[in-house]
Image: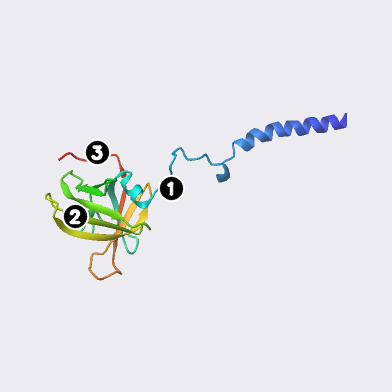
Amino acid sequence: MKLSRILAGTAAAALIAVPLAACSSSDDTAAPATSSVSAQDMTPSAILSSTAWETTGAKNQDGKDVPLTGKSASNYVGFAYFNADGTFTMYTLDDAPKMQGDWTVSEDGKTRTIVSKDDKGAVKFTRDSEIITLTSSEFTYRTYPVEGDKSTYVDIIHTPTTHQQPSV
């Protein structure tokens, strides 16, 4: 009789414990990602061309917010569309054309190069930018307001947007 009570108690405890364990919030039991390809599996170029980007912030070398309308950030504000074929277009937040051309990202994901071109395809300028963050949820690159001075910089922060590319 005593043994059957112990077994019954153990069985009841197991019936209660199993469902509770299934509800655990431990990170070890996190649900798998729903995407078949994670950003970790993508090349830096594929990440950059996977979405449209909007400038949503800027921070200086001290980590302080820089106004997007300020002199050191305003030139970099807008919407950017990096196409998988290596071309790009950028627009102001008012959808006015800003620049177009070709782009690349180094294999190690540390440098983005843009080659700005006019409407006839002539090169206007080439700019290399140090990439600070490049994930599916943030693209941040560094600018240096004073040429040759690496102690003063502004990180330009972009996040994905659903804003449709203007058809100008």
State the CA–CA distance, disc 3 to disc 2.
21 Å
State the CA–CA distance, disc 1 to disc 2.
29 Å
Q: Position of residue 162 (x, y in %)?
A: 29, 39
- Could you tell me which secondary element the residue under label 2 belongs to? strand
Any mark on residue 116, and which? 2
State the residue in front, 92 or 34: 34
Q: Three-letter amino acid code at disc 3?
A: Gln
Q: Quadrant of the C terminus?
A: top left
Q: Which mark is nearer the camera, 3 or 2?
A: 2
Q: Quadrant of residue 96?
A: top left
Residue under pointer 1: 41
How is the protein colored in the picture? rainbow
First of labels 1, 2 by sequence position: 1
Residue under pointer 3: 164
Any mark on residue 112, and which? none
Query: Is 107 on the left-hand or right-hand side of 165?
Result: right
- Taking 149 as reference, is 166 above or below it? above
Q: Quadrant of residue 50?
A: top left
- Taking 72 as reference, is 53 above or below it? above
